Amino acid sequence: MKLVIDKDLVQKCGGGSSEYWFSYNDCTVKNISEIQDLDRPDDIGQTAYFVSLGLIPFISISNEEIMRAFVRFKGSKKLNDILQKVNSDNFIDTFWKYFNVYPELKEGLDEFAEKFIVERIAEWCSENNIEYEIAERLKERWRLRPL
């Protein structure tokens, strides 16, 4: 079995959400609300119980991580120097202010984010010994619109 990295899977790890868990048993990603813990013994925590069932937390990628990578990829040295100094509490608001002013940031954010997330999922799979494949539809979109 392989984990198929497709558009639905990309949406499950974007935005820094930690509500999804990967199942080694059936190679799927499940919402934590779908996982029954009714049979969980009282002396074991929820995370330990999930791990005992062959589940691990699925990768979670924050908007800030995506935006910082986008600036490194497309931004000038000046812009990178400025935004590297911005702390996490203010980064997203600051990013959007610069996004609206700097022409080099105007195009490609959505495509970059999708590809960045897919690459991070692939890395996560490799780190966790999970076989995966990238859906042809995603690969085809990147061929049509290179970054």
Image (cartoon, helix red, strand yellow):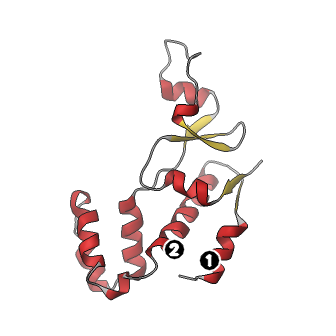
Q: Can see residue 88?
A: yes
- x and y, in percent, of residue 64 in the image: 35, 61
The residue tagged 2 is 111
The residue tagged 1 is 142
Vertical placement of residue 94 versus 57, above or below: below
**Element under disc 1:** helix
Q: Which numbered dot is residue 97?
A: none
At horizontal 42% and vertical 51% (from top left) the residue drawn is 16
Of callouts 2 and 1, the N-terminal one: 2
Do the residues bearing badges 2 and 1 touch, measured as CB atoms within 8 Å?
yes
Query: Relative to 38, is 133 on the left or the right?
Result: right
At horizontal 70% and vertical 63% (from top left) the residue drawn is 135
Name the residue nearer the viewer: 107 or 26. 107
The 10 Å Cα crowd at callout 2, few under 14, some 14 to 19, many 20 or more, is some
Q: Can see residue 84?
A: no
Q: Quadrant of residue 61?
A: bottom left
At horizontal 52% and vertical 26% (from top left) the residue drawn is 48
